[in-house]
Image (spheres, grey):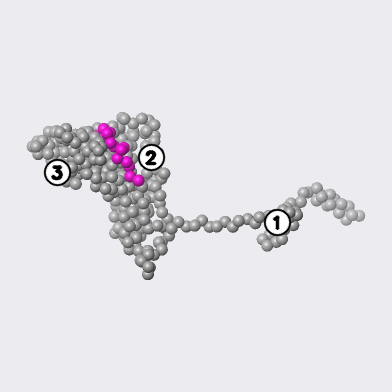
Amino acid sequence: MRLVFFAPVVFLIFAGVPSRAQIQLPGAVGAPTPKGQVITPPRAVSPRPREEYSGHFTVAKPPELVGVLSKPLRLLGVRGALQIEKSGDRLVVTRFVAAGDKISHPNQPCEVSMGGEGPVRLKALGSPDGVHRLELDSSACPLQFDVLNGAVRARSPIGVCAFTQADCRIDAAGLWGPAGGSFSDAEIKSMEKERGAIERAMRAHFRTLLSKYKKDKPAAETVIKDQAAFSAERAQACRDYDREEATGFCALRLTEARDFRLQSQLAAEDAARKSERPRDERGRLAKPHILRTVAPPP
């Protein structure tokens, strides 16, 4: 009697539980599809093809010259004056003013002015560090200007420039750009975002360049030293820029210059390696190695 009573109870309990879908194992035959219905088999997902290293790193487009044309530029945003213009197909300096010390009395200030008697020609020197470089056509002071976004970085191949007739010695090296107070709040915020992107790109390009010297310890050490020295040089160069603590303009532009320099080094290294790659019997370059490339931020 007990077994008879227990069987109906078990039946009633499990009768109210909905049945679950059965799991179809791989290779098992499922239930037949309704007549006329066609089931398309799933497409096989092809693996993502690896990117082949082309053997040539392309430097990003350098800042346009129009960004500094007819703009009032000052050394560290406060000293002197520099104005670059375009005259026909030539680039000229229509105004250049730089302060210095007298040659005869080093403790006394003096000033040198160029362009008043006529514009001074600028010679194009190409882009040795990834950006346009111009040289002032002056035997007394052949300054070289690297064109950045809204500024130029000046350097002198002869060091301090001496103007004997004016009894004045000047040091015009450094960043020539706009005054710090000329930026709006929106521009300052935009520069903060831009610097973050350029910093990331610079570090990525540094790591890529370093990875190319895994078997060349001296070259790797040189790259590491240059990168380590850059932070200190940037801090020194931007220390006295007008309102730098509020805008960060100088640090942004020098970081930009550093990133372009790393890109130019990558391109030069790739060009050298491409020329050393073996060729087949038809004179074609051997298949390049598979490497991970680094692209600059949009």
Q: Which residue is mark 1?
A: 23
- The local secondary structure at tag 3 comes to loop
Residue 173 percent across, percent down from the top left: 22, 41
Q: Which of the image's four quarters has the C terminus? A: top left
- Cα separation, mark 3 vs mark 1, equals 87 Å
Q: Which residue is mark 3?
A: 139
| Mark nearer the N terminus (2 vs 3) | 3
Tell which tag, 2 or 3, sits nearer the viewer. Answer: 3
The amino acid beneath tag 3 is Ser
| Mark nearer the N terminus (1 vs 2) | 1
Residue 54 or residue 208, whichever sits in front: 54
The residue range painted magenta reads: 61-74
Q: Is residue 298 left or right of residue 252?
A: right
Q: Which residue is mark 2?
A: 194
| Mark nearer the N terminus (3 vs 1) | 1
Residue 92 percent across, percent down from the top left: 22, 38
Question: Callout 3: few (<14), some (14-19), or many (20+) C-alpha neighbours within 10 Å?
Answer: few
Q: Residue at x 41, y 63 (%)?
A: 287
- Cα separation, mark 2 vs mark 3, equals 38 Å
Q: Is residue 244 magenta?
A: no
Question: How many numbered dots are placed on residues in this image?
Answer: 3
284, above or below 203, in the image: below
- The local secondary structure at tag 1 comes to loop
What numbered label is drawn on residue 53?
A: none
Residue that extends furthest to the front in the rendered view of this protein: 88
- Cα separation, mark 1 vs mark 2, equals 54 Å
Q: What is the magenta segment's predominant secondary structure?
A: loop
Q: Residue at x 66, y 55 (%)?
A: 40
Q: Is residue 65 in sight in this rendering?
A: yes
The amino acid beneath tag 2 is Glu
Q: Is residue 18 left or right of residue 171?
A: right
Residue 33 percent across, percent down from the top left: 73, 55
